[in-house]
Amino acid sequence: RSVRDQAEAYESTYVKKHHSQDKNMWVDKELSTEVSRKELANLITYKQDTWKVMHGGLSALLFGGYSLPLYAIWLGNDTWVPSTFNTSAAELKEWRKAQDLYRYKYASAYLAETRWFYDHHAAPRTPKHERAWEELWEKNDVRRDPKITRDAAELYDAFFQFHEMRRVSGRLLGRAMGIPTFPLWSKICIGTRIKDYWDLTWNEDYMVISQKSLESLSDEELYDYANRRFLAPYDKELTREQLLERVNDYFTFLGAEFVENGKAPNILITSAYCLGYYNDPAYLVEDIAELEKDDFEHLASWPKDAFLRRLEFENGPLRDQVEAHTVKLLDERKAAVEAAKPKEEVKA
């Protein structure tokens, strides 16, 4: 393609520039002759890890070497630490849990904002598109018919394409995808990462569909494949049959034109369809008895004066040691006094 064809959507101001899905994204049908599906999957993971590492490293531009403590704090959080830092199965499980929690947190926000923005502008809809639009927003584990929902992508593409995405939509979508978004200089910054992620993902999808290799994936590879498309949260512990159903529904959603011409549906609605599996407002459900506990128990010692804290310390687990040390100090003081008495008498 020429440079002009690959240029982003033109706007007079930088903050309004953005990528065009038609011009800047495409599926390379011959890519399988250069790389394998596994290599492409590793590249997607590598990009995600790089974004997390480099984003935290940006503080070095402002603070230099003084940013090292901030960087350590950044990488000390499972939300932003790269996947390669997990050396055991237990650590990987905790890391995946943190990733899913972050998706749960922002997926609902992105979906609500996307739906509100379209409904607010009251774009015209036919009965077919009306049904597709309502089908798209079903909650969490409710299966959405991919053939019906696909019409919603065509509807949205007619009014709000990728390059018309608002800044707030890009920020919410980026966070739902686990991409760092702060600070966000302009929407083209987050749009580039969203574009790169889905571009690689759709190329991998084309390989799997064209080579019919989905069934050959192991259980672990299949779960990873579905999770990178936001189709299968790890906390659901889905069976292989459930994973295959969701992935095949996703392939149906991509449509026949994707296989024939490599043209994917509207990226914003594709993201909404996939993140619908994270549209669960009850993701933070815990034991209700937790609400009865004192949230500030760890602050109970703050209002006590030094005398009370010393009494608690001296009568606590170290009481015997404190008592023995106190007796030793008293004996030493008494011995010193006794040793000083003869000298005073001699002088007299």
Image (cartoon, rainbow, N blue to C red):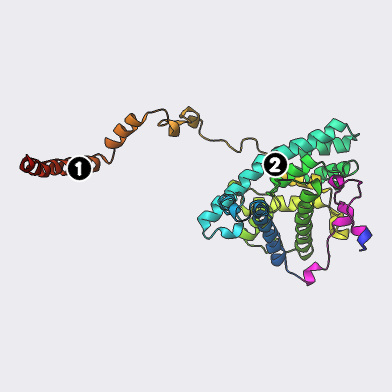
Expressed as whole percent of the image width and height from the top left, the position of residue 175 reads 70, 45
- Magenta span of residues: 5-34
**Can residue 142 be seen at all in this image of the molecule?**
no
Disc number lying in front (1 or 2): 1
Of all residues, the one furthest to the front in this rendering is: 348
One can see residue 276 in this view: yes
Which amino acid, by three-letter code, is at mark 2? Ala
Q: Residue at x 91, y 43 (%)?
A: 158
Position of residue 59 in the picture relative to residue 347 (left or right): right
Residue drawn 75% across and 57% down?
201
Asked if the residue at tag 2 contacts the one at tag 1, i.e. Cβ–Cβ closer than 8 Å, the answer is: no
Q: Any mark on residue 107, and which?
A: 2
Q: Which mark is residue 67?
A: none
Residue 52 sits in quarter? bottom right
Residue 238 percent location from the top left of the image: 61, 49
Q: Which residue is mark 1?
A: 329
Q: Position of residue 243 (x, y in %)?
A: 66, 52
Identify the image quadrant of residue 15: top right
Q: Between residues 45 and 93, which one lies in front from this camera angle?
A: 45
Left or right? Give the position of 195 relative to 245. right
211 vs 245: above or below: below
3D distance between C-alphas at marks 1 and 2: 64 Å
Q: 330 and 12: which one is in front?
A: 330
On screen, residue 249 versus residue 301, left or right, reads right
Name which residue type carries label 1.
Leu
- Check the image and report above or below for 244 versus 290: below
Label 1 packing within 10 angstroms: few (<14), some (14-19), many (20+): few
User: Which of pointers 1 and 2 lies earlier in the amino acid sequence?
Assistant: 2
Which of the two residues, 346 or 164, is positioned nearer the viewer here? 346
